[in-house]
Amino acid sequence: MNWDDTTDEAAAAAERLVGSVADGEDQAVEAALRPKDLGEFIGQEKVREQLDLVLRAARARGATADHVLLSGAPGLGKTTLSMIIAAEMGAPIRITSGPAIQHAGDLAAILSSLQEGEVLFLDEIHRMSRPAEEMLYMAMEDFRVDVIVGKGPGATAIPLELPPFTLVGATTRAGLLPPPLRDRFGFTAHMEFYEPAELERVVHRSAQLLDVEIDPAGAAEIAGRSRGTPRIANRLLRRVRDYAQVKADGVIDRAIAGAALAVYEVDDRGLDRLDRAVLEALLKLFGGGPVGLSTLAVAVGEERETVEEVAEPFLVREGLLARTPRGRVATPAAWAHLGLTPPPRPGGGGKGQQDLFGA
Ligand SMILES: Nc1ncnc2c1ncn2[C@@H]1O[C@H](COP(=O)(O)OP(=O)(O)OP(=O)(O)O)[C@@H](O)[C@H]1O
Ligand SMILES: [Mg+2]
């Protein structure tokens, strides 16, 4: 997978209403919607409980908190949690990201300017360069870096002591981190997708901050279409608010939320036009599969990568589509979701797609 932000898939992902990556508008409003302390942070019970213990214990000892690794899909609250860690420790926070640190020298400059107890938030930590990563190992473990001065045979390493600090690393792909780096974190938090009831609370909270009136059924309607992701819930809320202002009296209820999201082609399960196009092609043109990815992509008029990286992950997670060695296959839930009837089981117990699911 290519994580370069300029790829077509990234562009396709960024312009979707149900995309999980932050767009410009998200960035502009997210600061205002971020919970400020652990008590305000909704859901992620286990992570909150564990992190609360780690931070309380460090505070009681008057020590700097252990390094924390946050892993989870985009929009689940990693950046938010890093800021909460700093706030709970009463410490300043410095924010940077893996792609911004290409040379070990860039990292040395940041590390050597940290204050004691400061939180260094390193977003997309899996995208750091190799030399920087190696410098980070020593900094995390011994609070020391070796700064190399000069080049070639005359180069010398000058050791530099660092004040104790807390590194908070964030990654969407914990599996991509080299084990020596992963092992140097005292605590790893795996962020899960949110339950609809939790997203309802996110929607209510954001509505209050944005001064929007919404009733419980309206919040449930938005939460159910938000793909387990607070960022998407907040984005859908803003679009529904627009609709409520223009077409109604500004108050959001179930009917308004449903009508607004129908305009934006986000269905009751959070699938958008592209997701549905992929499912529809799979069901209507290929009888539910198996069909190869390339064929499926041509049928929906999209790039192979767009189908694979933008549409499929959510369809797979929702149990609507399966990737099998013989190709993409629709599940019984996919037929049900689009209100279609699966073709009859082939006579003689052939290898029809229903057999894959024991239907
Ligand atoms: N637990 C939560 N409770 C309330 N709001 C939340 C929670 N988690 C995230 N949010 C909201 O979702 C938005 C996105 O969260 P955040 O920027 O922290 O995600 P992220 O995991 O850092 O995403 P990325 O991987 O794209 O950097 C924030 O503006 C915040 O308001
Ligand atoms: Mg973030």
Image (cartoon, rainbow, N blue to C red):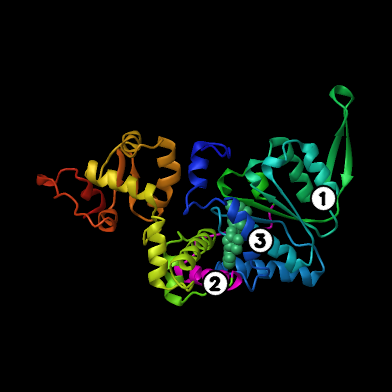
Instruction: Report if the beta carbon of the residue with label 3 is closer than 8 angstroms to ligand 1.
Output: yes
Name the kind of residue labelled 3 in the image. Answer: Ala
Q: On the image, which quarter does residue 84 sit in?
A: bottom right
- The mark that comes first in sequence, 3 or 1, is 3
Name the kind of residue labelled 1 in the image. Answer: Phe
Ligand 2 quarter of the rendering: bottom right
Q: Is residue 143 left or right of residue 3?
A: right
Residue 78 seen from this side = no
Residue at which label 1 appears: 143
Give above or below for 203 relative to 236. below
Residue 212 shows which numbered tag?
Answer: 2
Residue shown at the point (16%, 49%) measured from the top left: 343
| Disc 2 element | loop
Q: Disc 3 vs disc 1: which is toward the camera?
A: 3
Measuring from the top left, give residue 233's x and y in whole percent.
50, 62
Residue shown at the point (81%, 49%) measured from the top left: 142
Q: Which residues are magenta?
A: 185-210
Q: Residue furthest left?
A: 347
